[in-house]
Image: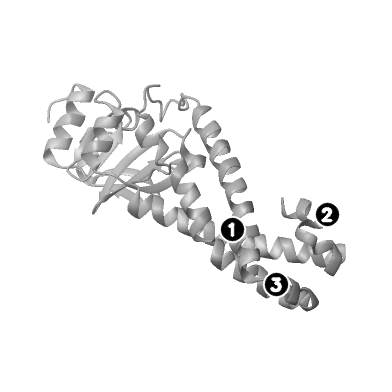
Amino acid sequence: MAVGLAVVGAFGSYVAMGLPLRLLHFLGTSLAISILAFGLSASLRRYVLGGAFPFWASLIVALAIAPLGGLIVQQSLRLFAPQALPYVSLSELTGQVLLINFFVAVVAWMAFRQSDDSVASPSKDVRHAQTDDISSELRARLPITLRQAAIVALSAEEHYVRVRTDRGQALILMKLSSAITALGPEVGVRIHRSHWVSRSLAASVDTRTSREGIRIDKDTVLPVSRAGRKLLCQLHNRPL
């Protein structure tokens, strides 16, 4: 979008700057404003909205960063086209930024929504196979890159849950009990008051060595409580 604005010389910029300067101006200001937008959006999603990000929140972010965005554009003009400053006010620049922000907010929200709707069922890999009815609520709180990944383990960290998948991990604002309920009773085993593992991973554990914990990767071993070990033994049809 920044390249397009530069090519057409949007907002009269073709009068004050040649194409190379317009490219620097629009790409630089777009990057700076995008950093503000993503930072504020991520903070709202994590600390205020509980992992969700509705359309109205996108519009609020677009509105909130417009004044600072206008100031960023003004400073960019001061650098690349100081002769244009007497002809454009900060309020006009803020209005231009707000217009672009609203457009980007709508397009981005529609793209993310389409991505959410197209999320396929988790992988059927033997080690991390899971059922297809994973809660959309929990999945929606994960980064887009992890929403199709097989969930391997959950761990409580204060008010958050660390979700470990076969493609990486993420921290979401959710109670461990709620996350386990969302996944369903057939999907995994709660091995400890603070930890849960997928049924496929639990099935691969040697219960004779489970007192040492369940290794998730080379750096992570989850503890197993007595009650958790009992559940593992039941899964393997073995005595304690």
Residue 99, horizontal then vertical, whole percent? 62, 52
Quick one: label 1, few (<14), some, or many (20+) residues within 10 Å? some
Q: Amino acid at mark 1?
A: Ser
**Pointer 1 residue:** 34
| Residue at mark 2 | 7
In the picture, measured across the screen, residue 58 lies left or right of residue 222, that is: right
Is the residue 146 above or below the residue 221 in the image? Answer: above
Using the rendered view, name the quadrant where residue 183 is placed.
top left
**Pick the front one: 235 or 197:** 197
Residue at 60% in and 63% down: 94
The residue lying toward the viewer, choosing from 80 and 134, is 80
Disc nearest the viewer among 2 and 1: 2
* Lateral position of residue 45 relative to residue 116, left or right: left
Q: For the residues marked 1 and 3, what is the alpha-carbon distance in whole angstroms?
A: 15 Å
Quadrant hosting residue 198:
top left
- Neighbourhood count class around disc 2 (C-alpha, 10 Å): few under 14, some 14–19, many 20 upward: some
Apparent side of residue 147 relative to residue 191 in the rendered image (left or right) = right
The reply to whether dot 2 and dot 3 touch (C-beta < 8 Å) is no
Compared with 85, 213 (above or below) is above
Q: Which of the two discs, 2 and 3, labels the residue nearer the N terminus?
A: 2
Type of amino acid at the residue the image marks with label 2: Val
- Secondary structure at numbered mark 3: helix
Instruction: Identify the residue shown where x is 30% and y is 26%.
Output: 187
Residue under numbered circle 3: 76
Q: Residue at x 43, y 25 (%)?
A: 126
